[in-house]
Amino acid sequence: MFGKDAEITTGQSTLNSMLGQGCKIKGDIELQGTIRIDGQFEGSISCPDTLIIGKSGVVKADVKVKNAVIGGKLVGNISAANKIELQTGSHVEGDIQTARLVIDEGVFFEGNCKMGANAGASATQSQAQSRDSHDHSKDNWARKEEKRPEPASAVR
């Protein structure tokens, strides 16, 4: 009835928490299992499994999950260790970090996207790696500036 069924998309995970349409909550959510949000939520979400934001769901939060299926609106950064799926009609404002990304036609996305096997790593690890690569690049520039012998002059 609503296009793709979130139960099929999430595979074997069981839905054990739900925030229904018309419900508004502010705070921090930490849970085991899968959560579906069809109402309004503001705060932060940490879930080792799957977050589903239904078509009527509005979430203003920083999110850290294994998988995410977004059909509604998300304002905030999202980090998923495995996969993020943006369904038709969804609206995402914020940065995305994930190993795999699926974007259906008709999605609004404004932000940055970082993908790859290590994309779900914590921000601290990313910053440390960035500092390390920055230090090495300084070394490379120093090597390029070393004086080299002048080429032999042409025979006259």
Image: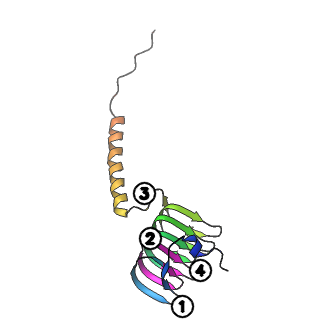
Tag 4 near tag 2, CB within 8 Å: no
Mark closer to the observer (1, 2) = 2
Residue bearing the label numbered 3:
118
Which of marks 4 and 3 precedes in the sequence? Answer: 4
Q: CA distance from mark 1 to mark 2?
A: 24 Å
Residue bearing the label numbered 2:
65
Mark closer to the observer (4, 2) = 2
Decide which of 48, 127 is in the foreground and name it.
48
Give the percent coordinates (x, y) of residue 22: 54, 90
Which of marks 3 and 1 precedes in the sequence? Answer: 1
Which of marks 4 and 1 precedes in the sequence? Answer: 1
Residue bearing the label numbered 4:
55
Which of marks 2 and 1 precedes in the sequence? Answer: 1
Task: Give me the disc on residue 22.
Answer: 1
Which of marks 2 and 4 precedes in the sequence? Answer: 4
- Mark 3 burial class by Cα count in 10 Å: few <14, some 14-19, many 20+: some
Give the percent coordinates (x, y) of residue 120: 43, 62
Farthest residue in the right direction?
1
